[in-house]
Amino acid sequence: MTETASPQTIFEAMGAVVTRWTMGSSATSAASFWRDELGDDPVEAELRLLAFSGQFLGATVTAEAPLELRVLPDIPQLALPTVPEPLRPLARRILAASKDAASKADLVYFLATRGWTTHPADWMPDASDEDAPDVYAVWRDWSAFAAAGETTPRQTGNQLTAGNWEDFWPAARKAALIGLRRRDPSAARALLEAKLGSENADARLRLLSLLSDRLSGEDVAFLEGLVANDRAPKVKALATSMLARLGHGPAAGEDIAELAGFFSVKTKGLLRRSRVIEIERPKTPAQWQRRKALLDGTDLMSFSDALGLAPQDLIAAWDWNVDPAADAGLIKLIVDTGTDAQLAQAAGIISEHDATGLVVALAPRLTPAERAKFAAAGLRTHGIGFEMAQMIAGTSARLDDLLSAPAGAKLLAELRRDDAKPSDHVAEFHALGLLASRTGAQQTLQRLTSAGLLQADPRLDMLRLNAALDDNGETP
Amino acid sequence: MAIDLKAVEQLATDQSSLKAAAGLAKPAKWSGIGGSSDGALIWGECAGSGANPYRVMADLRDLGNKCTCPSRKFPCKHVLGLLWLNAEAIVPFAPADTPAWVSDWLGRRRGTSAAKPASAPTATGEKDLGAARAAEPDVAEDPKDVARREAQAAKRNEETERAIVDALDALEQWIGDQLRMGLSGFIDDATARCRRIAARLVDGKAAVLAGRIDELPSRLLALASGDRPRGAVVELGKLVLLARAFRATPRDAEIRRAVASSETRETVLADPQAPRIDAQWEVLAEQVQTRRDGLVSQTTWLLNLAASGPRFAMLLDFFPASAGRRGSVFTPGERFRGELVFYPSQQPLRALLVRRDAADETLTSEWPTADQTLSDALSKPLLTEPWMIEIPLLLPQGRIAHDDSGAAWWRAADGATTLPLAGNAEGLLAGTELTRTAAIWSGNRLRILAAQSPWGRISGHD
């Protein structure tokens, strides 16, 4: 090769060479320093130049990085440890088999209840994943930070005040606010009073919902202010429903008499006379619609007033399982506008009345211990399946001896059938794994494998994870 | 749980399957043999004709079975071989934890047949284990026949070589045409133009080169549009170099492998020049790609955990896309001790798995440090194989960074090198220090296979 051709010379010529070829003209004259190597035959010279240029461009020219490159901060450690390494493949398999976000969330909540978190390579929440457990708040904010293109992280921690409100990313702020509400309910409310106005409607709705925890009479003035002044109908509706839970329902409108017309209070029994609500069956589809609209538009207190009953008497006198649509309407009223005591009362009654499915609707407002209790009762006395029980119980039930419930006997019998398929009852097995305590899971696994299931059966993944994972969570 | 040979015989589709299975019912063909503690499941890995062993599994309760080989026979000879090993207790099936690939198969199994006991034979024709086992009598060969066959083979070789050289002439002319007509037109119409010359190369017995040219357009399109003329010059320049190298040494196995075809497994195994490396390996990643010529390529990248020796090994198999989806042979992150035989090369990379055992328990989780500087690692392979398009790299400590447009870069901790990434990098990959990164450098961009970090091992980006 000609000695004078320095890499710099070659590099400078390459622009012209590539441009000429791009246009379809000969490039050899642009690389005169290789004249000897390229030779005299014009066709051959082009090919030789192509070989040289290709090698030069491929080996020595790499894209130059821009001076300004943004490096994301380290993904922070969470307050809870990640799942032990040997169990990660199992957790990954369960996540991969979870078809929707809700069932992924089940696993994530289950782990959090037991004192664990996912490994960030296996699962991380999005910035907008409002349903993720609070322990993941710093990861959500990390994602928000990555998406926003900022370069310095904002504050995290527990000491949220009106002064440092802006320094927090939303998820960390939410977690801090939840902590504050638990420690000092009125401080949390005062903070919201100061800062809520500067947030957008969606954020206001989410922040306001945090007041559900420890809701008390002290919150009434603030909530009334929101009902009167907030611009967003959703926020107003939530504040109204919270007020109703505190017994400060809105004045009943004219419609309430019309709604009461769909029901009548009768007495029954000769010696111990008790009241019972008789539900007038709507006659036309339009009437069904109207009744539903009226139920949606009222609150528990106004409705019971219109029937001349106290709310707890209305719940006690309701004739369950006669008109499912009316049952659902009342349950919705209780969830949205009932007090905690009324809610617990309703859950107790419907659990006894073999209407266990309705407990699912009440579950989000029940405590984990109550949820576990109703799920266990449903399993033992009303023969519900594990899937339904898990919907009632959530992910922190820790039940024992599940297979002796009717659903367990049924499952074992189905496994012995001649036409049993390896893909049968996937959801039931998964629910079992979420419901059981650790020892319960170990015993259940043992019974299932001695009933003929393979230890490696993927349907048992959730049970196996439960059985293998140390339970470091707080028990309710 | 036990099965008898009668069941194996019934399960076989025909006598030839049984015959082939008899050849496989030998311990030397198998590794990783195991069974579930309840005795219901058995599994093993059987050496086939490819670089990867086949994973074979069976459920003894109903003789349900699965093998990762592309055979259209069901069950294939590997399954029959495994069952045979079990029926005759030729090797012990030690109770072990069910591997993830067996569990995955169990999860996918469905249909009514699973719980039924093995049914009556479905195939017609008599099958007989005894006959399958009988050795073929050796027929003494006539020396004249041998000489004649060798002469024929030499002639065929010469003909092939001539055909390839003719095809390469056509290729060079085609490359010259692309330059004359302008690379901008070539880039716009690359798929159709490459298809035509690839077809000519297939006719000229340069099948490997044809496959490479068929994939050229997709490599070009992966580049930013402003970078494509440069990319086209690099790709076409490499083709010229390869064509010239073949003309100079048509018998060189390494060059022939890049142009015409690879040696068979048997040839490599029998070659005393082929380096054999017995080491601890970590599976970095598996890439499965459907190519334009209808083949699916399955590439497994392995990292040698020893302090020295070939740092990477690549197990490469092809099978027809029509054979359906194949199960993975390895799980990324898994480690094993194994003997690999490398195709003879100045830079051994492509390999075959000869034997595989459990990994050494005492092995540190750390990857070795890179044994050459990054600039050497990037450029040295091109001195011996300038036509190479994928260079595996073991990168030192570094981190992912993003530019204003959101494109991702890998930056060395010492700031000396910054390399562009082929895809995006999100989540953990971008949010932690990467103490070591294994990647492929191709088309002047980096594709991460796997990395090590304070959070442990991280898979690469897609």
Image (cartoon, coloured by chain):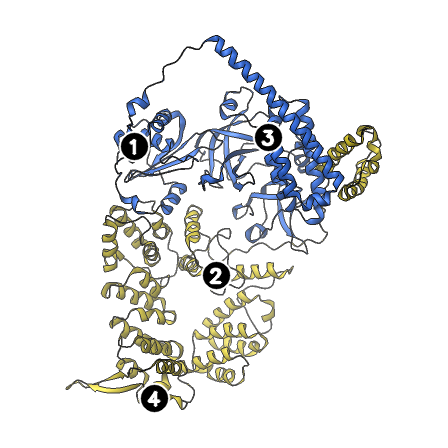
Question: Is residue B415 visible in the rendered structure shown here?
Answer: no
Q: CA distance from mark 1 to mark 2?
A: 63 Å
Q: CA distance from mark 4 to mark 2?
A: 43 Å
Q: Are marks 1 and 2 in contact (CB under 8 Å)?
A: no
Q: Which residue is mark 2?
A: A135
Q: Earlier in the sequence, mark 3 or mark 1?
A: 1
**Chain coloured blue in the rendered structure:** B
Query: How packed is label 1: few (under 14 Cα within 10 Å), some, or many (20 or more)?
Result: few
At 62% from the left and 48% from the top, the residue drawn is: B399
Q: Amino acid at mark 4?
A: Asp
Q: Nearer the viewer, mark 4 or mark 3?
A: 3
Query: Which residue is painted at 40% across and 43% down in the image?
Result: B100
Chain letter for yellow, please. Answer: A
Circle 3 Cα neighbour tier, 10 Å, few/some/many (<14 / 14–19 / ≥20)? some
Relative to A45, residue A378 above or below: below
Question: Label 2 sits on what residue type?
Answer: Val
Secondary-structure class at tag 2? helix
User: In the image shown, does A87 or B301 lie closer to the viewer?
Assistant: B301
The chain letter for the residue carrying disc 4 is A
Q: Which residue is mark 3?
A: B203
Q: CA distance from mark 2 to mark 3?
A: 63 Å
Mark 1 lies on residue:
B124
